[in-house]
Amino acid sequence: MARDPYLVSIDIGSHSIKVCVVKELLSDKDKLQVLALVDRPSAGIRRGIVTNLAEATEALISAVNDTEAIIGLPIRRAVVGLGGMSVSFTNTHGLVVVSRSDNEITDSDLDRVIQDSLTKAFGLSGSEIIHVIPKNFSIDNQKGIRYPVGMTGSKLEVETLVISVENSYLRNFTKVVNQSNIDVLSQIYTPLASSDYILASKQKKAGTVVIDIGYNSTSYLIWENEEILSSGVIPVGSDHITSDLAVGLQTTIEQAEVIKTQYLDLNANSTTQTIQLEDPDLHTLNTFSLSEIEEIAKLRAEEIFFLVNKELKKVNRQGKLPGGAILVGGGSILNGIQEVAKETLRLSVHKHTFDPEKVNFVSDYGGDPKFTNSISLAAYATYHAEDIDYTQSVNKPLSRLSNSISSRNDSGSAFWDTVRKILPWT
């Protein structure tokens, strides 16, 4: 089957479904044209878990239909972003003796050492591996080697990051997409795609954390020396701010969400100002204190970055990332969130904006950060399209070691070719 002239990414969250359609510009292969960006309410998903297949499928079909109406073409295949609390991260170590008599390291040695690291990984029972990422290599105890092929040594070691998801989580999400008459080209860990695409090489080298503030959870991924140092998920997101406001202000979730998105400024210092909102159900006019709103919301926002700080401390990077922190995700749109992050993390903090030299946008994009992940997923998959099989419905993850090794050919290791293309530091 011929490759589609465009690539579609789907980012399914508890709050909304985002669909992005891109194509490469023929005049500039390093630049993408965004053809469509669609954001629609999700259903049947709670805290990142599919709770109702029928409702989730109906919501996705609606989002896809709206996207097809924009581009005027059918959507048959898509890459799907994965994230949330069902994702796990395992750091593991592999060691092999170099096979050649002259001790020159080959692609085959790389395959073997990474496979050895997987056999030693713990906690993967009941999970599906979606990414296998060699972080760094050692040759005869000489550490910090990025690409050892062609080098000489008797012992080769690797530190590997394995990203996996619970089997039931993956099967149910795949079923929702398939029931929407879409084949899954690949499942990609969303923070990996976002950080890999939006960060410049100098940021990956200096040390930078990308913080994705989602609806129910917050993900982080740290780059340093052009390697992934650490990644994880924190069970607090922007929805917790909404819930706190609803309880603290004694109002509905719906009104709390309006207050959060339209009136909240976490960096303000309001004193006597108030706002009035009509309750559409009771037809009453409610008055709320801005200072109380700010106090309630700031406590929860500070907690998000306090928890991120705890994770940074585990890898001795608390306040020690020269590249600072980059905020993405729907929660990063909140007014004043950047200042709260800066104060709590003691780092430079920036909200991500796409480089117009890399992406051409639809006219109504407006720089909305809630689309950062869906755009990055599409871009990531576009620039690694050689890893995606367009001849069939694969429903398999990108960079899966077992699939790559089984398809190796006489020219060398297909797995290592894939890793080299995905991660610039290789």
Image (cartoon, helix red, strand yellow):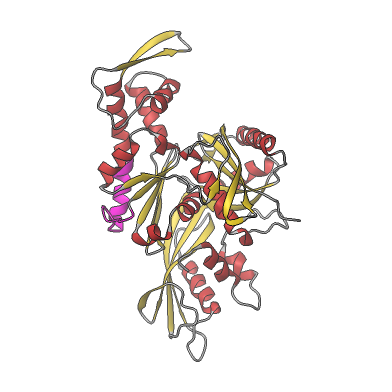
Whether residue 246 can be seen here:
yes
Q: Residue drawn 52% across and 49% down?
A: 376
Q: Nearer the viewer, residue 104 or 67?
A: 67
Q: Is residue 234 above or below residue 412?
A: above
Q: Position of residue 31 (x, y in %)?
A: 56, 53
Q: Is residue 307 magenta?
A: yes
Q: Toward the viewer: 175 or 339?
A: 339
Residue 141, placed above or below residue 183: below
User: As drawn, is 421 to the left or to the right of 222?
Assistant: right
* Left or right of 337 in this view: 361: right
In the visual, does 211 lie left or right of 196? left
Image point 52% across, 75% down: which residue?
Answer: 112
- State the extent of the magenta-drawn residues as a range: 304-323
Figure disc tally = 0
Quadrant of the rendered structure where residue 10 is?
top right
Give whichever of 18, 358 is nearer the camera: 358
Task: Kindly identify the residue that appears in the image at 29 percent across and 38 percent down.
Answer: 340
Q: Is residue 229 visible?
A: no
Q: Give the percent coordinates (x, y) of residue 307.
A: 31, 45
- Quarter of the view holding residue 330: top left
Q: Residue furthest right?
A: 1
Quarter containing the N terminus:
bottom right
Relative image position of residue 336 (x, y in whole percent): 33, 34
| Image coords of residue 99 (percent x, y) | 51, 85
- The residue at the far front in this view is 27
Q: Give residue 179's quadrant in the image.
A: top right
